[in-house]
Image (cartoon, helix red, strand yellow):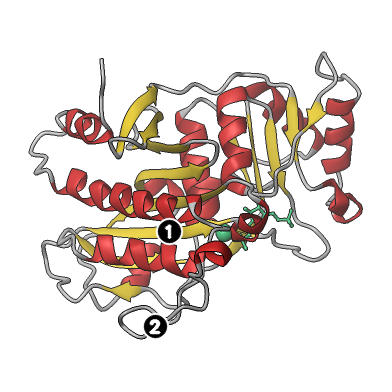
Amino acid sequence: MIVTVQQHILQDQKRFPGASGEFSWLLSGITLATKMVQARVRRAGLSDILGDAGDVNVQGEIQQKLDVYANEALIHCLSARASIGVLASEENEEPMIMGHCSKEANYAVIFDPLDGSSNIDVNVSVGTTFSVMRRPDGVTCEEPQKWLLQPGCKQIAAGYVCYGSSTVLVYSVGNGVHGFTLEPSVGAYLLSHPNIRMPNQGKYYSVNEAYRDGFPPGYNQFLDRLRQGGLGKPYASRYIGSMVADLHRTLLKGGVFLYPPTSDHPKGKLRLLYEANPMAYLVEQAGGVATDGKRRVLDLQPEAVHQRTPLIVGGQVEMAEFLRCVPHEM
Ligand code: AHM
Ligand code: MG
């Protein structure tokens, strides 16, 4: 049976008494924007041949870089949704308050429009990540920080799109994790990975090992244990350098992904609100574990929109071993 993402969201929504349909309308803004982005990503590299880059378009603007385009596509599609009061993006220093923000605007959407964008030039997968928060009671449109700076456990939906060999949307509204593959000839996301469960144990670890001399105590011991067969068959390594692609593999095939604190990035490199939180939410929904090396990621109280965090996510077996090597409360 063919199930589109729209049908799936509507069915999911029926579980909530009094659901008004506004939430499925919100998510349709994300699916529309990511279809626009994927169409551009697929044409990356053609600009020199077709003469796009540097061209002036009808409004007199110079052709944009893909990450700027992706940001504008998301802002354009989401700002038309009356249920959204606040947007925050990796590309914008400050949160955006929607012009229509009124009592009916209940949600904030936080996103990284094009994660791993430096990989575009070499034809490597990139992605979009998003996180949806509900407006806390009594908070006005003039206080966007209060909509955004909530711990990840308050997310009411999260997901990503991976622009890889195909375009795949993975999302959760707290009822399992579901994956949809874009059927390009009809332009619809079709259910391809219902109820994704992360294997308890996988075969790969995924980390930028070039930074290993700067990892905190215990991290290298953990990686050595994996490599040397301490958990059974020795692990192999896979690291794309595009978080969405690395996490998509980790979610489907199991294993562990780490972006630890390093000498250059003592607080980690990834952003809490729009990279770590949505990924941690999906990983937990799929039966895995997500920590910053000190605490559960979803319990971290954010202090700034663009705050960074270390991120370690994996299956139950790998993460139990990680906890032995890097003891902390979980
Ligand atoms: P970006 O937001 O500037 O694209 O950086 C985030 C990316 C992630 O996709 C990826 O996991 C990480 O940076 C790779 O960093 P490094 O090259 O230090 O391993
Ligand atoms: Mg990013």
Give above or below for 196 relative to 185: above
Q: How far across and how far down the image is residue 243, in percent?
A: 61, 47
Residue 63 occupies which quadrant of the picture? bottom left
Dots 1, 2 in contact, CB < 8 A: no
Given residues 125 and 248, the one toward you in this image is: 125
Residue name at image x 62 percent, y 19 percent? 200
Q: Which mark is residue 135?
A: none
162 displayed left or right of 134: right
Q: What residue type is disc 2 on?
A: Glu
Q: How far across and how far down the image is residue 99, in percent?
A: 19, 76
Residue name at image x 34 percent, y 26 percent? 191
Q: How far across and how far down the image is residue 155, in percent?
A: 37, 48
The residue at which mark 2 appears reads as 61
Quarter of the rendered structure image containing ligand 2 = bottom right
1 or 2: tag closer to the N-terminus = 2
Q: CA distance from mark 1 to mark 2?
A: 25 Å
Quadrant (top left, top right, bottom left, bottom right) of the C terminus:
top right
Total marks placed: 2
> Would you say residue 303 is visible in this rendering?
no
Q: Residues within 10 Å of mark 1 (few under 14, many from 20)?
A: many
Give above or below for 298 relative to 253: below
Q: How far across and how far down the image is residue 238, in percent?
A: 75, 35
> Would you say residue 78 is visible in this rendering?
yes
Q: Which mark is residue 111?
A: 1
170 displayed left or right of 59: right
Given residues 125 and 221, the one toward you in this image is: 125
Given residues 249 and 151, the one toward you in this image is: 249
Foreground mark, 1 or 2? Answer: 2
Given residues 286 and 71, the one toward you in this image is: 71
Residue name at image x 59 percent, y 38 percent? 247
Q: What residue type is disc 1 on?
A: Phe
